Amino acid sequence: MAYNIADLLEHAVDAVPDRPAVVCGDRQVTYAELDRRANRLAHHLAAQGVGKGDHVGVYSRNSIEMIEAMYAAYKVRAIAINVNYRYVQGELKYLFTNADLVALVHERRYADKVADVLPDAPKLKHVLVVEDGSDSPFEGTEYETALAGQSDERDFGERSSDDIYMLYTGGTTGYPKGVVWRHEDVWRALGGGIDFVTGEYVPDEWTLAENGKNFGMVRLPAAPLIHGAAQWAAFGALFGGGTVVFVPQFDADEIWRRVAEHKVHVLTIVGDAMARPLIEAYYRGGYDASSLVAVSSHAALFSQSVKQQYLEAFPNVVLTDAIGSTESGFTGMGMFAKDADHSAGPRVNFGKDAVLIDDENRLVPKEPGATGRIARRGHVPIGYYKDPAKTEKIFAEIDGARYVIPGDYARYEEDGTVTLLGRGSQCVNTGGEKVFPEEVEGALKSHPGVFDALVIGVPDERLGQRVAAIVETRPGQEPDLAGIDAHVRLEIAGYKVPRTIWFTDRIGRLPSGKPDYPWAQRYAAEHQPAQ
């Protein structure tokens, strides 16, 4: 047996060929159509020399073509690389080169950015462009032209459970880093290869598809497919013969319209950043959501007050809050009922391979009140792409087992659940996007009028946290909010740009010269911001 993403998808195609597989906007494809189109694209890639172990970038909003491109890459044992469509040129250049892209599939709307970066990505030899209604001139081959004339036969060689899946996520310096998994491991950790409720292994590669023959759930992942939470909500649904509904970019009203139109059963979201506008749009628009049976949040703060709003609006819906990361996979999940006491914070049941460890990498006894870092063993990633030093930092061997330690802290409770306490680092989680202070500080300090800066996260009702900065201007320079904002937006993606800024005569630093983030939080609490 090969626990391979392409094989698992092909089993679903064989089980339910005529069932709708992916819906986006006014288009949809059945499982058979998805497979045939992915086969044509896979043959085209192979004709360009793309094969086992090669990296194919996918630079797109949510779309049918994005699923096809990833599926096609896995068919020829290549590795699909997610490209964040919010990145600007500097970030794209780093990703294209760090990821060793040899081919790229992108929406036409990003053609100007791709053209700027291509000269700095010498390994990137083949570009496919998906029409999206924009008129930007592009360099490369039009996507549908590439598919035309290619065979739609599934005549590829055998694949392996050891084939590589990779997902790029934010790094400790703010630069994206590729997390490398074996196909079998990531399927077990995130894709339904382990029953999240019972903890039991799915017995073989055909079980999910066979179980989906009689009924397929309709799921709508609201997050962008450039993130792991949405990818694995989609892949997990497709492995089981379900229908996946997308909107190209997050739009609360459009999501509820699609829920009503396609009778969506499961809505997956990313914390308050999506939950708040969705619940407000639901009440404002009077939408029909009677088909919903579950709402599941991943990867960001889903606050108790917002959960209560959902439970009041949908008393018969199962509400879940899953924890985990790109590095760790699924580590725990909480289920919530109306009027339950959730005042203690996010509380979940650990998966069977998750534990708490102390700062010396020793297992923490499962006693009420005991705290530690979340760690998980079993099916874990191989490490970070081309970065053994970072890989070493997130893994530990304990009692002969290899554990991954993503960086979250938690506490054991009397009832056997675990309360999530948060990250031990200074990472800012703004609407599910990880923003690292060092990168934003570097962008700020590259402005000619800025001498020093510290970046922190401050509470935000909608996003959970927003990026904020304390800035020390150069002597003799007047604070220039508009100029700093415009400058930073040329350096980093918009979601990383500080939304709130304070000015100070001197930045607080430790004697070693390292940032004093507690000082920064105190300063922000005690002073009115400039913006």
Image (cartoon, rainbow, N blue to C red):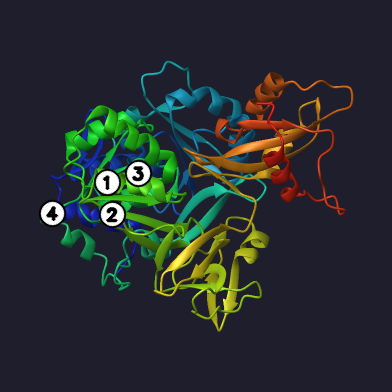
Report the front residue among 481 and 459.
Answer: 459
Q: Residues within 10 Å of mark 2 (few under 14, many from 20)?
A: some
* Residue linked to disc 2: 338
Label 4 or label 1, whichever comes before in sequence order:
4
Extreme residue toward the top, this view:
135
Q: Position of residue 99 (x, y in %)?
A: 57, 46
Q: Dot 2 lies on which element?
A: loop
Any part of residue 128 in sight: yes
Q: Secondary structure at mark 4?
A: loop
Q: In the image, residue 274 lies at what x, y percent?
A: 40, 39
Q: Measure the alpha-carbon separation of dots 2 and 4.
A: 28 Å
CB under 8 Å between callouts 1 and 2? yes
Q: Quadrant of residue 500?
A: top right
Q: Where the N terminus falls, by quadrant?
A: bottom left
Q: Which residue is mark 1?
A: 312
Quarter of the C terminus within the rendering: top right
At mark 1, the secondary structure is: helix
- Please state the horizontal and vertical placement of residue 90, each as a whole percent of the image: 64, 33
Closer to the chain start, of discs 3 and 4, is: 3
Which residue corresponds to mark 3?
42
Foreground mark, 3 or 1, reads 1
- Amino acid identity at mark 1: Glu
Q: Which residue is mark 4?
A: 215
Amino acid at the residue labelled 3 = Ala
